[in-house]
Amino acid sequence: MSLPQAGKNFYIHTFGCQMNESDSSRMAELLATDGWTGIDDPEDADLILLNTCAIREKAESKVLSALGRYRLVRNRRGTRLGVTGCVAQQEKEKLLERVPYLDFVLGPDQIAQLPAAVSSAAAGERLARTGWMDSEEYVFPRADPEAARGQVSAFVTVMKGCDNVCSFCVVPHTRGREVSRAYADVVQEVASLVAVGVREVTLIGQNVNSYAGGCTFAELIRRVAAVPDLVRIRFTTSHPQDLSPELMEAFRDVPQLMPHFHLPVQSGSNPVLKRMRRNYTWEEYVQKLERTRELCPEIAMTSDIIVAFPGETDEDFERTMTLIERVRYDNLYSFIYSPRPHTSAIRHEQDWGVVPHDIAVARLERLQKRQRELSLEKHQSLVGRELELLVEGPSRTDATRRMGRTVWNQVVNFAGKAPAGALARVRIEGATVVALSGTEVSFVPPKVPVERPAPRLNVLPTVVASDACGG
Ligand code: 5AD
Ligand code: SF4
């Protein structure tokens, strides 16, 4: 089929975790340097990228149905279509065979090849690049600080890949081995983001606490905290086995490190944890968590849980329910086990016993219902308190109100005037499961105003990121 002459508008549809969100930003910046403009409506795009997630089957099927929709845009205006991220890495060139209207496939280590892939597509060639780069040759794509102008908060990649072997997880296959970024490079990127008005950074990686870029992860946090005018640091995601006393102490000692710890437990049953190859018992996990709470008493704790892992009995599941009662998490991300290609669990499913789907759904619903009650109780306990918020801008639900986040990362919609980037004191007056509401008492504006980005810099259009990944 001959396609009409294409212009230079692009649209990126991002699925999955913060790592993908960050990779999408880097790809958008690369395209912008090549004269492309990011737009919000895929219907007007000349290039559509699907930056994909393979963590569960549902995530993968969403990608295939989105591709089907974008095919119509391609038929109408000759739009080129590329798949990047974890599904690209998992399927490699097979994806070009399965999807005949797809122009290119690029794995997560091949972001720098994007301009070449786009030129090949324009010349009518179909290309798949999914090779790995090992630690010596891998260069972390650097953020363009100008593209972050207007953002209060930004992600900074500190490592990639995962050397663990959790039996359910496809990430080691799609993201490869761990490679850490040199600490000086991380600190420099953080400083350049702060210079354009960013006030909070989230250090990201599939397994951040096994960071090894010339210092420990706790040391990296201290170095980042030394960047003047940076007010908040967060990180995600961590594995309980690599949680060092030094990192727990950082929550007590580094004022910029926010008291929120996402520490995926996956299950509260030791036989299940063993089959998951998590390398800890629930008792060891709880001990580390309680030690962290001793050091930082009000710390918010969140976690990931998989229900209906092969062989999970009613008794195993009850142990998970007991664990959540004991820990009283602020929030949980919970999922039904999804068999993934290339994982060891898929080979043992029949030996261990597959949990029927209706039982899996009932377990998930029970867990989520109880967690909603616990999350609401936590939120309600904050009513009447005056909290410090980092203000992000207008509220998404009511543009006459403002929105900011507590140190524990909860969203607060409030009546007030604090500009984006300000630290505001807000009295909390109401609570739901998902957010808090209140009234501003006072605020301190940011030194560097958080300016709206110039139109050229609208390089990161609609990002649909829903699932956390890693840990
Ligand atoms: N099935 C269900 N959930 C999974 N996760 C990872 N792999 C799977 C899978 N095969 C969950 C884990 C992880 C989170 C990002 O996704 O809970 O921590
Ligand atoms: Fe690595 Fe996390 Fe996947 Fe385990 S669950 S293999 S730690 S990314």
Image (tube, rainbow, N blue to C red):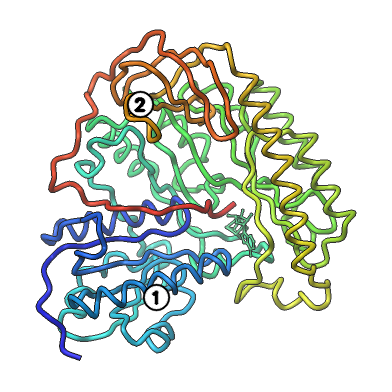
Q: Give me the disc on residue 189.
A: none
1 and 2 marks in contact (CB < 8 Å) = no
Categorize mark 1 by other alpha carbons within 10 Å: few (<14), some (14-19), many (20+). Answer: some
Q: Identify the residue at horizontal 38%, vertical 76% (top origin).
A: 68
The answer to which of 387 and 217 lies nearer the viewer is: 387
Disc 2: CA contacts within 10 A as few (<14), some (14-19) or many (>=20): many
In the depicted structure, whether residue 45 falls above or below residue 303: below
Circle 2 — which element? loop
Total label count? 2
User: Which of the numbered marks, if any, corresponds to residue 230?
Assistant: 2
Residue 34, image quadrant: bottom left
Q: Position of residue 160 (x, y in %)?
A: 46, 56
**Mark closest to the chain's N terminus, 1 or 2:** 1
Q: Secondary structure at mark 1?
A: loop
Residue drawn 44% across and 41% down? 203
Residue sitting nearer the eye, 159 or 372: 372
Give the residue displayed 19% in from the left and 80% down from the top.
120
Q: Nearer the viewer, residue 65 or 338?
A: 65
Q: Amino acid at mark 2?
A: Leu
The amino acid marked with disc number 1 is: Gly
Which residue is the site of mark 1? 131
Q: Quadrant of residue 50?
A: bottom left
Question: Quick check: 160 left or right of 50?
Answer: right
Report the side of 24 relative to 52 (left or right). left
Residue 78 shown left or right of residue 205 in the figure: left
Q: Is residue 126 above or below residue 159?
A: below
Q: Position of residue 404 (x, y in %)?
A: 41, 26
